[in-house]
């Protein structure tokens, strides 16, 4: 018994020692992320010197994969140096943290929305390269929406495409009803109430999904995601720029002039099929990919869809608009082949070879002018929509900043869900504030409710 | 014993009444039991039926036809063509990878787990109690909690982004060890082993010639459990693999869903023809092997899972 006890004790002791060794090794391994994420990893030297023969890995979605292939065909001497991976880019920030821990594995070029770039630009991820030295002032000046790529004065991505919000409308119905397209949100409200009385069943908007926050609140310069530097953000749902939107939406919802469904809900799509959508504030890509592909698919009618600039609030000196999507290309700060990575990104964003026939509105203005041909003669539209899309792109504003917390998801959780329960938008502004603030704080922001 | 012959509803009803009398259930009890079972069957069966039917329907039919209705056979071919069109037919690689990762993991885990369970059940050695305790503890640790430490470990030895990063961790199957231990501890008579030893068997021969042939139900059960866990494994391959051609089906399906507007309206600005029914087809492709393996292995699964439940 004594012998057995002694043997057991020795075994347990050895097991304990082994466990401690594992913990010590783990603690040693903990140094790796700090070194890697601070840029002190082995790749730094390679990146500084740059190896023109090094292979780069590009993370992209399936839609943009042909763009990379096109670059490879255009520059065959570079083709074998590019490895393409089709990924779920939402996983990108999490993967970067893993790579930072192991000190290897980072992709060199990634296609992602600017808000994802914002997430990987913080101290923990520390992923993107400052592209300022690689992009001339002339090229920068020809981009629309490039503010979304500037973080702390650094250019951390180049915009691929824009999804600026505009006001889509059914021109034939508007003409038939004798209505004028509203130029201000006040006119929009007045017309909505009129439509509800004169033509019940027709709608002038949809507020049932999380993109309503971009469309309506983003169109009012409401401070929900106004970055005041890398570590401070202004959030104030009680700001008059927010409450005026809430009041407008409540009146339109009560009159049933806007739908409580989202634009992608089957019930709203049915309104489109039944030709009951009089107006719809939405992104620039809705013309091709929502009206044409869904709402008007069953009953295509030529020359029906019109587009107008997003309405402006009468009291504002200028028009504000946000976006529903629009992506960018970002480059790894320690890429071994910065020349190829930046050449690729510059070509992808500025070359007419790709952008002139790209699926969505190019952010680079000369490329957008070339892209114009893809929609110019489309019979879907009542008139050439490009001039309106181009002007609206210039209304994108930097105060609707790219931040590390997700405003749209919070909006869905609080406002969309509250509306489904019969609450008013105005009554949900305070809970929305209370949900947003801790989200921002969890991402390391100091939240203020007034501009310092 | 009274028997009832004949066919048809009358005969079935008489049989039910006889069964009811024997089991002591009233007519009301039988009806309630039947209704309850029907509700449960519908609750669990309808989603499965929807999944089977969804690939036969296009987007309009999916919304406008009844939930439990058939579209057309041609739609399945169209859905498959859409899947092949995604990322150079990556789905074929995902299917191949899933089969390879899963079979390798099953073989490896069974090879490791069965001898370990046997040794723990039949031999006494220092630390045995501790190993059994640790096995029980690790059983209750969620597998996903171990993925990140595993990632660091496999990265250290350069195995991340290789098939080994998915296959090797599958060898760690504490529940299988515990099942094998219970099986041998309760179903393998120690007298049988003693007799074999007297006849000159060494330890390896005891395991190979006596313990292993007696463990066929156990092997079936372990293989099924391991197959099910590894075939549906998402988080481990998601963390370990970065090359899209190395994904297994669950990670591939997630990538597919994220890259198409089918389930992600914000990505509607693409020319992708993928619709919800196409993704349902991938779900179906993922489900069929599990169902087939269950059907073929159910005899072993039942007998294996009951092993040790009765002390004789």
Image: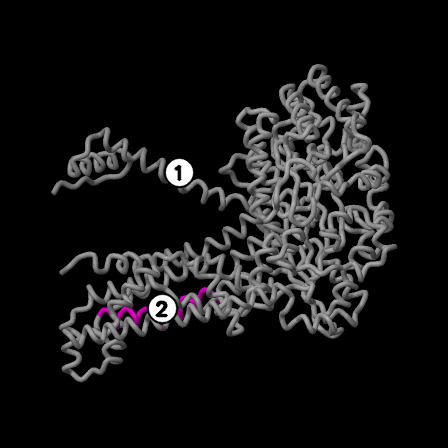
Residue ID at (37%, 64%):
B173
Check residue B42 in the rendering and tell me which mark sits there, or answer none.
Answer: 1
Please state the horizontal and vertical placement of residue A4, each as a whole percent of the image.
18, 74
Check residue B224 in the rendering and tell me which mark sits there, or answer none.
Answer: none
Q: Are marks 2 and 1 on the same chain?
A: yes
Asked whether residue B301 is drawn in magenta, I would say no
Label 2 lies in what chain?
B
Is there any visible trace of residue A276 in the rendered image? no
Disc on the earlier residue, 2 or 1? 1
Q: Quadrant of residue A205?
A: top right
Please state the horizontal and vertical placement of residue A126, each as a whole percent of the image.
64, 59
Q: Main SS type for the magenta part?
A: helix
- Label 2: state its secondary structure: helix
Label count reads 2
Residue ID at (27%, 31%):
B31
Q: Quadrant of the C terminus of chain B?
A: bottom left
A373 vs A77, nearest the viewer: A77
Q: Quadrant of the N terminus of chain B?
A: top left
A123 vs A180, nearest the viewer: A123
Asked whether residue B104 is drawn in magenta, I would say yes
Q: Farthest residue toward the front?
A: A452
Is there any visible trace of residue A378 in the rendered image? yes
| Residue B40 left/right relative to B265 | left
Please state the horizontal and vertical placement of residue A227, each as a whole percent of the image.
69, 44
Residue ID at (74%, 67%):
A338
Number of residues whose C-alpha sits closer than 10 Å to that of mark 1, classed few (under 14), some (14–19) or many (20 or more): few
Query: Magenta stretch?
Result: B101-121
- Label 1: state its secondary structure: helix
Which residue lies under the disc numbered 2?
B110
């Amino acid at each position: 018994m004594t012998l057995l006890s002694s043997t057991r004790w020795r075994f347990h002791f050895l097991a304990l020692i082994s466990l401690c060794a594992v913990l010590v090794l783990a603690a040693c391994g903990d140094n790796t992320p700090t070194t890697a994420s601070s840029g002190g990893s082995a790749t730094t030297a390679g990146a500084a010197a740059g190896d023109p023969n090094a292979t780069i890995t590009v993370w992209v979605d399936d839609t943009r994969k042909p763009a990379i292939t096109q670059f490879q065909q255009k520059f065959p001497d570079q083709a074998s140096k590019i490895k393409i991976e089709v990924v779920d880019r939402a996983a990108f920030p999490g993967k970067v943290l893993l790579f930072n821990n192991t000190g290897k594995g980072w992709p060199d070029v990634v296609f992602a929305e600017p808000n994802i770039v914002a997430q990987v630009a913080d101290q923990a991820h520390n992923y993107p390269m400052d592209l300022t030295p690689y992009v001339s002032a002339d090229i920068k000046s020809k981009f629309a929406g490039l503010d979304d790529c500037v973080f702390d004065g650094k250019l951390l991505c180049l915009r691929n495409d824009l999804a600026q919000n505009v006001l889509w409308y059914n021109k034939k119905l508007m003409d038939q009803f004798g209505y004028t397209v509203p130029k201000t949100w006040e006119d929009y409200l007045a017309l909505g109430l009129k439509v509800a009385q004169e033509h019940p069943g027709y709608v002038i908007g949809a507020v049932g999904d999380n993109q309503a926050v971009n469309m309506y609140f983003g169109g009012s310069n409401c401070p929900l995601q106004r970055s005041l530097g890398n570590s401070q953000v202004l959030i104030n749902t009680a700001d008059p720029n927010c409450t005026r939107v809430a009041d407008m939406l409540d009146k339109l919802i009560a009159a049933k002039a806007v739908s409580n469904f989202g634009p992608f809900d089957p019930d709203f799509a049915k309104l489109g099929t039944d030709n009951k959508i009089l107006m719809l504030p939405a992104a620039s890509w809705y013309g091709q990919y929502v009206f044409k592909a869904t709402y008007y698919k069953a009953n295509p009618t030529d020359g029906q869809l019109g587009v107008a600039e997003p309405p402006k609030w009468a009291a504002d000196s200028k028009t504000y608009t946000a976006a529903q999507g629009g992506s960018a290309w970002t480059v790894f700060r320690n890429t071994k082949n910065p020349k190829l990575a930046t050449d690729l990104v510059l070509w992808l964003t500025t070359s007419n070879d790709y952008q002139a026939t790209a699926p969505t509105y190019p952010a680079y203005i000369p490329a957008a002018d070339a892209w114009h041909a893809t929609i110019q003669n489309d019979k879907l539209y009542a008139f050439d929509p490009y001039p309106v899309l181009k002007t609206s792109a210039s209304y994108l504003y930097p105060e609707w900043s790219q931040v590390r917390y997700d405003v749209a998801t919070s909006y869905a959780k609080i406002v969309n869900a509250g509306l489904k329960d019969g609450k008013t938008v105005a009554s949900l502004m305070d809970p929305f504030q209370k949900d947003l603030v801790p989200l921002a704080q969890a991402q390391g922001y100091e939240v203020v409710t007034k501009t310092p | 014993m009274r028997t009832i012959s004949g066919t048809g509803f009358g005969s079935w009803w008489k049989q039910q009444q006889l069964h009811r009398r024997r089991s002591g259930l009233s007519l009301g009890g039988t009806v309630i039991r039947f209704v309850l079972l029907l509700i449960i069957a519908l609750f669990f069966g309808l989603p499965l039926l929807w999944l089977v039917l969804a690939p036969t329907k296009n987007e309009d039919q999916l919304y406008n036809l009844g939930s439990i209705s058939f579209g057309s056979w041609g739609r399945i071919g169209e859905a498959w063509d859409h899947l092949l069109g995604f990322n150079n037919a990556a789905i074929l690689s995902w299917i191949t990878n899933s089969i390879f990762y899963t079979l390798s993991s099953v073989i490896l885990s069974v090879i490791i787990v069965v001898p370990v369970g046997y040794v723990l059940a039949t031999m006494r050695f220092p630390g045995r109690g501790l190993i059994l305790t640790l096995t029980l503890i690790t059983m209750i640790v969620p597998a996903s909690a171990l993925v990140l430490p595993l990632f660091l470990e496999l990265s250290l030895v350069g195995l991340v982004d290789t098939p080994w990063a998915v296959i090797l961790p599958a060898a760690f199957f504490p529940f299988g060890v515990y099942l094998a231990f219970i099986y041998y501890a309760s179903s393998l008579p120690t007298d049988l082993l003693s007799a074999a030893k007297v006849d000159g068997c060494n330890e390896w021969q005891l395991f190979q010639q006596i313990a292993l042939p007696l463990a066929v139900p156990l092997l079936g059960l372990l293989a099924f459990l391991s197959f099910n866990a590894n075939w549906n494994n998402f988080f481990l391959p998601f963390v370990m693999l970065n090359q899209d051609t190395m994904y297994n089906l669950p990670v591939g399906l997630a990538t597919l869903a994220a890259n198409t507007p089918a389930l992600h309206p914000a990505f509607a600005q693409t020319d992708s023809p993928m619709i919800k029914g196409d993704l349902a087809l991938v779900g179906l492709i993922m489900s069929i092997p599990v169902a087939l393996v269950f059907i073929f292995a159910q005899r072993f699964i039942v007998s294996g899972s009951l092993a040790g439940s009765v002390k004789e």
